[in-house]
Image: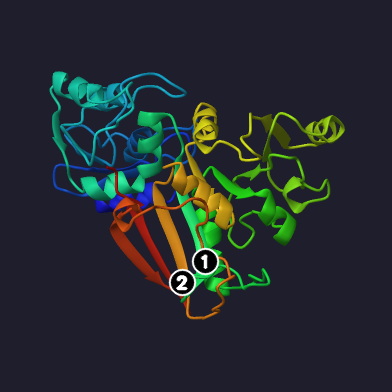
Amino acid sequence: MRRALELAELAEGNTSPNPMVGCVIVDALGAVVGEGYHERAGEAHAEIKALAAAGKIVEGSTVYVTLEPCCHSGRTGPCCKALKEAGVKRVVMACPDPNPLVAGKGAGYLRNAGIEVVTGICRKEAERLNEKFMYWITRRRPFVTLKYAMTLDGKIASFTGDSKWITVEDTRSFAHKLRKSHDAVLVGIGTVLADNPLLTTRMIPGKNPLRIVLDADLKVPLDANVLNNDAATLIVSGQHVDKRKLSRLRKMRNVVVLQMEADDGIIPVKSLMDALGETEITSILVEGGSAVLGSFKDAGAVNRVCAFVAPKILGGKRALTPLGGKGADKISDSIRLTDMEYKIFTEDILLTGRVKEE
């Protein structure tokens, strides 16, 4: 099963809106005869890949798969039927699939076909692997990760606004890997005007995420880097904006403008998450400044936090901290993280945890 999890992770960032799935087939003596993983949405599932690799040496074998096999026809055919027809004896799956089209039906199909089904092997690891998919498929809202880099005294910029670079290169390269693992990366117009970022994964191989800019008053410069052709961009604006500029933006290649009713120049986070979830955006990496990060916290729209801490001290009471917004009245009202993990880079440390659901 651990090998199946390794295989599944190879497709990180490429399968959305589908989950990452890996599969290993062993014969009656325990020898591996086939492996496979789901590489991209619309392509063959992990079980089908592994069956093809195993060829005819399948009958009586055991299949290890990281997620409950599907029993419905979508972009591809049902995996349960293929496993039955291949004559497998046993299916060991890490965790059930929360997709309402599967959710226990896959395991039930296999048992009815006389195939032994074992569940729960490496379940925690499998659920962590697909935490974004599992959140989206059950709530139809994107899984949101807040990401920021700060100094040891909790500053994301000096009092003059300077923020390049708080972290070192290998840390920033890992941050680009985070971008690849999400469907979209989101910032506010303040970040665009101050830093003119590209918001791409240029430091690593792989796809660029959708770039989302919260820009209630449509202040984005027409020559901003986020409007280039390196990736698609979604500008989220208010209803009452310059119509000529709106028209010019909508004529740009790879640029879409979504207009929403803004409250005092603030895009409503909850309404935006509902709208994006319906477009099959399963996950968003929020990289905005203090105001944007704070607005997601205040809206209760945070699932994971990735805090990069650099061994530097800025000081200054006017220097920005990571999360602005209203904030919590009391310590007891703060959001709490669980399942904490850390990763050490050349100089910096990443602290990450899942927001505890009340």
Q: Rounded to the nearest whole Å, what is the CA distance between mark 1 and mark 2? A: 6 Å
Residue 6: image location, x then y, percent: 34, 53
Name which residue type carries label 1. Ala
Q: Residue furthest front?
A: 329
Q: In the picture, which quadrant includes the C terminus?
A: top left
Residue 350 spot, x, y in % from top left? 42, 67
Residue 160 placement (x, y as % from top left):
68, 72
Residue 159 left/right relative to 345? right
Q: Amino acid at mark 2?
A: Val
In the rendered image, the vertical position of residue 220 relative to residue 88, given as above or below: below
Whether label 1 touches label 2, CB < 8 Å: yes
Q: In the rendered image, which quarter is residue 110 located in? A: top left
Closer to the N terminus: mark 1 or mark 2? 1
- Above or below, 81 relative to 214: above
SS class, disc 1: strand
Reading the image, the residue beneath label 1 is 149
For the question of whether residue 180 can be seen, the reply is no
Q: Which residue is mark 2?
A: 309
Where does the image place residue 133, in percent across and percent down from the top left? 40, 38
Q: Residue at x 15, y 18 (%)?
A: 112
Q: What kind of element bears circle 2?
A: strand
Q: Is residue 130 left or right of residue 161?
A: left
